[in-house]
Every structure is written in structure tokens, then in C-alpha cells.
């Protein structure tokens, strides 16, 4: 894989990752007339829960569902410059033009009843392919392997950014999820704090004397009814206490804190099993499933020995024509009520034909 770092017209960094033999050198210049990008945000801590909330008012003006011919993530074409100056690409990463967190945010947290401070961090966009019409599940294993390497590369880079406490790679797909750009892409957040979900999992692990996911993995593999797919290094299963009507966890058999810690064999193996999982997810209702794919990684500075890397893929689609909305119990009290049993979902996923022939 070849890695090329360039700069966009407003000073943001863009990085090309090429896995195609003979791919051209990445020398194209961003010809847009853009002001210097120095957007900033603020974080405030809820005094009742201790959770941080990010305030980023500039994101109200971000691009919203443009037509395919005006997609800002497609390659640049004559007369139509985009976020990617090249005429084609394999995988590309660039700083988000409308970030929730930014390296331009400066200052310290101010104490008080509602502590507040700068939204220090970094937000990046990851385009998995230059093909606007495809999806992650239709990528080749080679391309998925490249994406894994990209996630690992960016996790290492963002972990070194001053002020970043946790790195979160994720993909949102589908109108029902709220995606505003349909081009196949994901994002990576470098948070200035440890997220509430991770804090909770670390607290449970600390109380148990170590990561609980190892015990969960062994239990699911032995019990078997919720397992979707297995390989040499990974197991995919529906968790026994699934919150979402469609929810699958993809877990490595070896405890590692984050993506950079995966071996080449584990990365190769993930590409294969994840494509199998996505094939069955899209085959569940014979349509592209709207989903969020979220990597749970160890924080940068704390709890690394208690963490166990895993990918959580979930969807709000509870039936082919029905959505799960977060109602009073979920939104008000964080008590989840699932209309689908994990065992039934697992059986249906195992029997679902893959939309991609895998």
C-alpha cells in the first residue's frame, strides 16, 4: 500500500492510500477558493451525569443530501471540484470540513457547576472507494484489508494528537440512520475525553478483574445459537442482551486493545469474515441494511489492559418496512426494550442468502 500526504485548499490534510498496482502518483492540486479552515467547538459536562456534550454550531451548514452529480466525496471531474482533487482514488482520508472536534480549539477546561472547555480533537472522513454507487459489503477482500490498515494508521496518528483521549472509527449507512452523504464512507473521531459507553465497559471490567468480553466470547462460541460466522481469528455473534433489532458483534479471539495491535493474519481474516457478515445483513430483508458499524477501542492513556477490541454493527430496521424508534424508555431512561429476540435474529441471519454471493 502506498501512502501519499497532500493539502487541500483550506489547509486541511488529505491522505491517499493506494492498493492498486500502477496507481498514478497523487499530485493533483485543490483548485477551490476556500477560506482557511479553523472551525472550533466547545465541550460542556452535564453536572447530573458527568457526561461531556460537544457543541459545534458550525455543523448546521454542512452539506446535506446533495444529488449524486454534486457529491463532495466523489473524485474531482472537469468543472466540478470536490473534496478529493484526484480524478480517481482507492482509499482516501481527509480532515472533516465540518468537524465536531478540532485541533484549532485551544485553551483549558474551566471548572464550575458546568465545566466547559475547547472541543480539542480531530475528525476525519474515510472514503472506501471512488465508486459512488457501491457499498462496503461489495468491496473486495483486498480493499477491506486496505481499509483495516487505514483505520490502524489513523488510530495511531490520532492517538498522538495532543488532547485526544479516545479514537473512534465508524461507518453510518442509509437514510434511516440519518446519513447525509450516500457515497461509501466512514469517519474517525479523536475525542478529548473517554466516551460514556467506554467508561461504563471499563468500570465493569475493573470490577470483574479484567475484560468481560473474553468470557462472553467463550460463552457464545460454546453455546452456539447466536453465532453468525466463525473464522480462525474472529467470531461474529448476536449478543444475548442485544439492544437493537439487528445487532452483531465481531470479536477477535485474542485480546488486543486496538486496531494497530492486530497482526497481518488477523487483519486478513477480518476482511473475509466481515464481508460474510455484511452479505447476510443485506440479505436479511433483500436490501441494503441501514446500519452503524462502530469500533470499540481502548482509550489512548487509560484502561488499555482492561479493553478488548471489537466491532459492533447494528440497525434500526426491525422489519423490512418498520423502524425502531427510541421511545420514552430508551431515550428518557436508557432502558432498552427489544422487539426481536437475539436467538431468532441469529437464526434468520444464518439462513439469509448473501447479497454478494459469499
Image: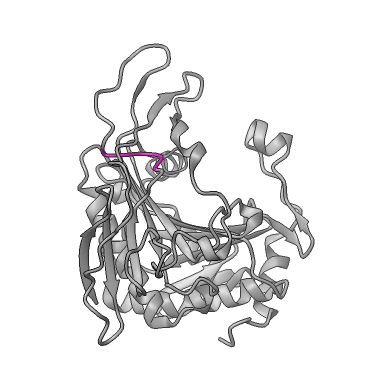
Q: Is residue 354 visible?
A: yes
Location of the N terminus (image quadrant)? bottom left
Please give the name of the residue rendered at 31% of the width and 39% of the height, measured from the top-left corner: 102
| Observer-nearest of 40 and 154 | 40
- Residue 331: in magenta span: no
Q: Nearer the viewer, residue 13 or 79?
A: 79
Q: Is residue 241 visible?
A: no
Magenta region: 99-103
**Residue 164: x, y in percent?**
28, 41
Task: Give the number of marks.
Answer: 0
Question: Which residue is depicted at the point 30% across and 69% down?
Answer: 149
Which residue shows up at 69% across the image and 42% down it?
A: 326
Q: Is residue 276 above or below residue 303?
A: below
Q: Quadrant of residue 354?
A: bottom right
Quadrant containing the C terminus is bottom right
Magenta span includes 101? yes
Image coords of residue 52 (percent x, y): 43, 30
Q: Residue 162: where, in percent of width, then height?
A: 20, 39
Q: Main secondary structure of the magenta part?
A: loop
Q: Residue furthest right?
A: 321
Residue 114 to residue 170: above or below:
above
By what rule are the colours in the image chosen?
one colour
Q: Position of residue 143 (x, y in %)?
A: 39, 78
Side of 354 relative to 140 (left or right): right
Amino acid at each position: 500500500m502506498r501512502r501519499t500526504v497532500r493539502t487541500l485548499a483550506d489547509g486541511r490534510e488529505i491522505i491517499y492510500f493506494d492498493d492498486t498496482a500502477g496507481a498514478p502518483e497523487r499530485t493533483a492540486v485543490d483548485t477551490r477558493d476556500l477560506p482557511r479552515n479553523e472551525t472550533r467547538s466547545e465541550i460542556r459536562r452535564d453536572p447530573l451525569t458527568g457526561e461531556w456534550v460537544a457543541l459545534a454550531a458550525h455543523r448546521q451548514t454542512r452539506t446535506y443530501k446533495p444529488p449524486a452529480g454534486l457529491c463532495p466525496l466523489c473524485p474531482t471531474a472537469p468543472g466540478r471540484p470536490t473534496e478529493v482533487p484526484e480524478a480517481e482514488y482507492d482509499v482516501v482520508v481527509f480532515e472533516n470540513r465540518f468537524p465536531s472536534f478540532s485541533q484549532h480549539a485551544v485553551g483549558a477546561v474551566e471548572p464550575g457547576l458546568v465545566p466547559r472547555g475547547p472541543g480539542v480533537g480531530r475528525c476525519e472522513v474515510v472514503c472506501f472507494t471512488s465508486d459512488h454507487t457501491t457499498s462496503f459489503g461489495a468491496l473486495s477482500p483486498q480493499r477491506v484489508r486496505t481499509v483495516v490498515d487505514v483505520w490502524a494508521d489513523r488510530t495511531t496518528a490520532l492517538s498522538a494528537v495532543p488532547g485526544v483521549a479516545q479514537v473512534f472509527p465508524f461507518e453510518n449507512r442509509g437514510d434511516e440512520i440519518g446519513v447525509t452523504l450516500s457515497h461509501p464512507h466512514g469517519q474517525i473521531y479523536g475525542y478529548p475525553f473517554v466516551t460514556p459507553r467506554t467508561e461504563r465497559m471499563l468500570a465493569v471490567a475493573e470490577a470483574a478483574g479484567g475484560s468481560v468480553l473474553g468470557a462472553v466470547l467463550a460463552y457464545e462460541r460454546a453455546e452456539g445459537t447466536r453465532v453468525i460466522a466463525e473464522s480462525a481469528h474472529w467470531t461474529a455473534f448476536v449478543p444475548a442482551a442485544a439492544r437493537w433489532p439487528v445487532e452483531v458483534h465481531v470479536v477477535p479471539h485474542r485480546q488486543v486493545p486496538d486496531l494497530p495491535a492486530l497482526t497481518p493474519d488477523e487483519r486478513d481474516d477480518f476482511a473475509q469474515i466481515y464481508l460474510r457478515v455484511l452479505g447476510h445483513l443485506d440479505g436479511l430483508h433483500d436490501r441494503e441494511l441501514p446500519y452503524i458499524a462502530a469500533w470499540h477501542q481502548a482509550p489512548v492513556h487509560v484502561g488499555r489492559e482492561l479493553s478488548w477490541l471489537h466491532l459492533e454493527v447494528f440497525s434500526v430496521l426491525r422489519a423490512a418496512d418498520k423502524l425502531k424508534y427510541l421511545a420514552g424508555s430508551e431515550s428518557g431512561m436508557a432502558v432498552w426494550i427489544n422487539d426481536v429476540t437475539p436467538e431468532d435474529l441469529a437464526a434468520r441471519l444464518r439462513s439469509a442468502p448473501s447479497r454478494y454471493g459469499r
